[in-house]
Image (spheres, grey):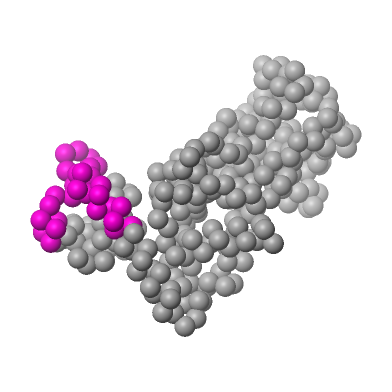
């Protein structure tokens, strides 16, 4: 049984597409199909049912996928053991990240990791915390970096960084350094989308102050913290956002930062991974590095 054919097979499974798998591993679609056909011939069994737009795994295909992940992992371990220098370790690490970590944490994490493993290649998929976790659960991402926990027996969380929420306003807005929630109800407000970790913490703040969303003058919703801050810089409205994201702009005097009275709760940004997924050696090293840095 050819290990490269098994690798191609796992990519078709993960992408649910021959064409997307081919694009990912830089092969033609016909070459990918040939590898799968050769594997089916060797094993004398059908691995996919081609009955719709997406190839569907047969029961035998599902069993082979689990074995293929284990065999490929053992191969990576063997190569890693035989390497004289750890800097030769190669591979792709797929990270699903929510907005704030994707912009303000992951670039630093990648830089630090590549100083030790310069052959590592990163694919970053930025979305909401909820969508990032779904990708980790499905196995299409090796790990996630998010600002909210979602309960699942399959997930393990490593806390990376603690922070809090702050109010941001344009440089022309006249508000004191510390405000309470009732002070800001009169101002146009820019809100993060409902799937974000920031929004979940903001809703907790509103409940604590007995304020309903309907009482706020919300004029826009956005998926992007960068877009949100641009709205605020233009003086269109004010917003509550991650202190980590805000400081990059307030340090340049592009925004004003205000503390929120009576709201001292902090949150963590987490690295999350699926304990049932067999990770490549390079992805496992990235996870272990994050864990060790947190415990240092």
Q: Quadrant of the N terminus?
A: bottom left
Q: Give me the residue at 87% from left, 34% from top.
A: 178
Q: Which x, y percent locates residue 161? A: 68, 50
In depth, the one of 4 and 19 nearer the eye is 4
- Is residue 280 shown above or below 61? below
Is residue 201 rendered to the left or right of residue 254? left
- Is residue 85 shown above or below 48? below
| Residue interval drawn in magenta | 40-69
Residue 36 figure quarter = bottom left
Is residue 174 rendered to the left or right of residue 83? right
Is residue 272 rendered to the left or right of residue 174? left
- Is residue 136 shown above or below 175? below
Q: Give me the residue at 71% from left, 22% from top.
A: 207
Indicate yes or no whether the magenta region holds residue 130.
no
Q: Which x, y percent locates residue 120? A: 48, 68
Q: Residue furthest front?
A: 153
Q: Which x, y percent locates residue 215? A: 71, 16
- Is residue 294 shown above or below 57? below
Q: Residue furthest bottom?
A: 84
Q: Give me the residue at 82% from left, 38% from top.
A: 258
Q: Give me the residue at 59% from left, 72% from top.
A: 115
Residue 121 visible to the viewer:
no
Q: Quadrant of the C terminus?
A: bottom right
Residue 179 figure quarter = top right
In depth, the one of 39 and 97 nearer the eye is 39
Instruction: Please state the total of marks drawn on the protein image.
Output: 0
Q: Which x, y percent locates residue 226? A: 63, 44
Residue 15 visible to the viewer:
yes
């Amino acid at each position: 049984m050819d290990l490269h054919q098994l690798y191609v097979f796992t990519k078709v499974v993960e992408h649910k597409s021959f064409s997307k798998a081919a694009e990912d591993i830089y092969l033609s679609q016909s070459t990918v199909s040939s590898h799968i056909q050769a594997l089916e011939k060797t094993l004398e069994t059908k691995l996919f049912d081609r009955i719709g737009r997406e190839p569907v795994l047969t029961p035998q295909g599902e069993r082979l996928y689990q074995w293929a992940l284990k065999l490929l992992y053992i191969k990576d371990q063997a190569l890693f053991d035989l390497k004289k220098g750890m800097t030769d370790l190669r591979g792709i690490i797929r990270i699903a990240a929510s907005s704030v970590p994707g912009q303000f944490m992951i670039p630093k994490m990648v830089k630090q990791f590549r100083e030790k493993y310069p052959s590592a290649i990163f694919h970053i998929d930025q979305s909401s915390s909820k969508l990032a976790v779904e990708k980790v659960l499905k196995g299409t991402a090796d790990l996630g970096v998010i600002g909210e926990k979602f309960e699942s027996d399959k997930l393990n969380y490593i806390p990376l960084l603690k922070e809090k929420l702050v109010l941001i306003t344009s440089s022309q807005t006249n508000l004191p350094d510390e405000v309470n929630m009732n002070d800001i109800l009169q101002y146009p407000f820019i809100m993060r989308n409902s799937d974000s970790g920031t929004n979940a913490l903001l809703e907790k703040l509103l409940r604590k102050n007995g304020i309903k969303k309907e009482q706020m003058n919300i004029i826009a919703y956005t998926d992007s913290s960068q877009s949100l801050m641009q709205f605020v810089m233009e003086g269109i409205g004010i917003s509550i956002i991650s202190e980590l994201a805000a400081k990059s702009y307030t340090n340049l005097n592009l925004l004003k930062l205000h503390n929120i009275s009576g709201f001292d709760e902090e949150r963590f940004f987490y690295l999350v991974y699926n304990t049932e997924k067999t990770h490549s050696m390079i992805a496992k090293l990235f996870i272990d590095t994050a864990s060790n840095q947190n415990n240092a």
